[in-house]
Amino acid sequence: MNIRSRFPDNFLWGTATASYQVEGAANEDGRGVSIWDTFSRTPGKVLHGHTGDVACDQYHRFQEDIELMKGLGLEAYRFSIAWPRIFPEGRGKQNPRGFDYYNALVDGLLEAGIKPVPTTYHWDLPQTLQDAGGWPARDTAYAYADYAEACFKALGDRVDMWITLNEPFCSAVLGYLVGRHAPGEQDRGRAIAAIHHLNLGHGLAVQAFRKGGYAGTIGTTLNTQTARPATSSPEDIEAADRAADFPTRMFLDPLIGKGYPRRFLDAYEDAVIPIEDGDLDIISSDLDFLGLNYYHEDCVAHDPDHPEGYRKVAQYQPTTEMDWPITPQGLHRHLTWLHEHTAGMPIYVTENGCAMPDILSADGTRVHDHDRIAFLRSYIEACADAVQEGVNLKGYFLWSFIDNFEWAYGYTKRFGIVYCDYLDGRRIPKDSYYFYRDLIAGME
């Protein structure tokens, strides 16, 4: 039995990228400055001083990439829209050239028989809005909703599947608490405020979509996580449950009408959410689907000395170049948990993949990335198991279509099934590209 036969005929097979990671053209056609432009140009923030100024140059080479997608037999392409291209100052005057690229990209995808799936926010907040307070400021949620509505109006006649935010956990926690991502702050109070306003912005965008009467569906993408307990002791089982509070319930639960997890908020005195009347109703506006970005599963044990009652512990699995353990069973467990927790909401895996030590062949024409193929096969099989058991999984988007700017790691980590030569922009399909092509065709 081939892998595809284990999925419904209407299961959606795609790949994904994000604007700052692939587009380049950072200073062209009226694009404004984003927090990632500022962050990556700040010495010491990104490895080797790499920036997304050029990236994969998809802004100029998207037709070439669409041809590669067509050769892949791809059914959908998830990309993100760069907010600073639409509103260079974050809000107010719209850049008339802002949608030219996305109109051409959407039209090219449709002509190739590929479904365009835009994400309206994948971390490139306009710098002017950060200067005015960023996501910790309530007004940013309203600015985002205005921008998202502009996207719906411009592309909604040809796009019928929308994603609001990508991984707000990373925007809020890595950006405002840990400081590893733009804008590089380390303030728990501002991080908690950012979480709420990202959630609020999402809800406002969904309301604008519904009010506008646009055709199609709208959802969001979270990188929710559930850890496995190190032992079967009640203490470790509770620790694993608590480990889902911050990365998962703080973002998912308000969206599905369950509010914020009191247990996590009680663990930190400075975890005060700036909720106003009506916010939770806005945030819980009806979703058509949930996007899941999934890479690995943690293992945790009880820790009475940690405010949240758990600690991560060692595990045996081999790891990817990101030092993430390869845990396909964890994906199966998490999909099952999500299905139950959301009462069967439709789910799409909107990112899944791995960074591997890809090496060009001596003649520069091939990349034999069989470790990535083994990874993909195991995770997609885990998805198939979940579907067979009744999980309402509707599609799978492989991360990533092409090697790209991997945030604080710059260009040192390659996730793509297409190799990008960053010196000249050449695209070289890896062996994993041909594996995914065969899988989509039902030949794997």
Image (spheres, rainbow, N blue to C red):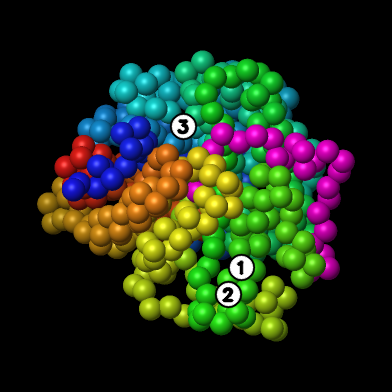
Q: Which residue is denoted by mark 2 in the rendering?
A: 237
Membership of 279 in magenta stretch: yes
Q: Amino acid at mark 3?
A: Val
Left or right of 353 in this view: 345 = right
Sequence-wise, the earlier of marks 1 and 3 is 3
- Residue at (32% x, 23% y) in the render: 113
Q: Amino acid at mark 1?
A: Asp
x then y, percent, for residue 413? 39, 58
Q: Secondary structure at mark 3?
A: strand
Q: Residue furthest top?
A: 157
Q: Amino acid at mark 2?
A: Ile
Q: Residues within 10 Å of mark 1 (few under 14, many from 20)?
A: some
Q: Is residue 10 visible?
A: yes
Using the numbered discs, state the Cα–Cα distance from disc 3 to disc 2 in whole angstroms. 38 Å
Front in this rendered view, residue 16 or 394: 394
Membership of 143 in magenta stretch: no
Q: Which residue is denoted by mark 3 in the rendering?
A: 117
Q: Which residues are magenta?
A: 268-292
- Residue at (86% x, 43% y) in the render: 276
Label drawn at residue 241: 1
x then y, percent, for residue 185? 70, 59
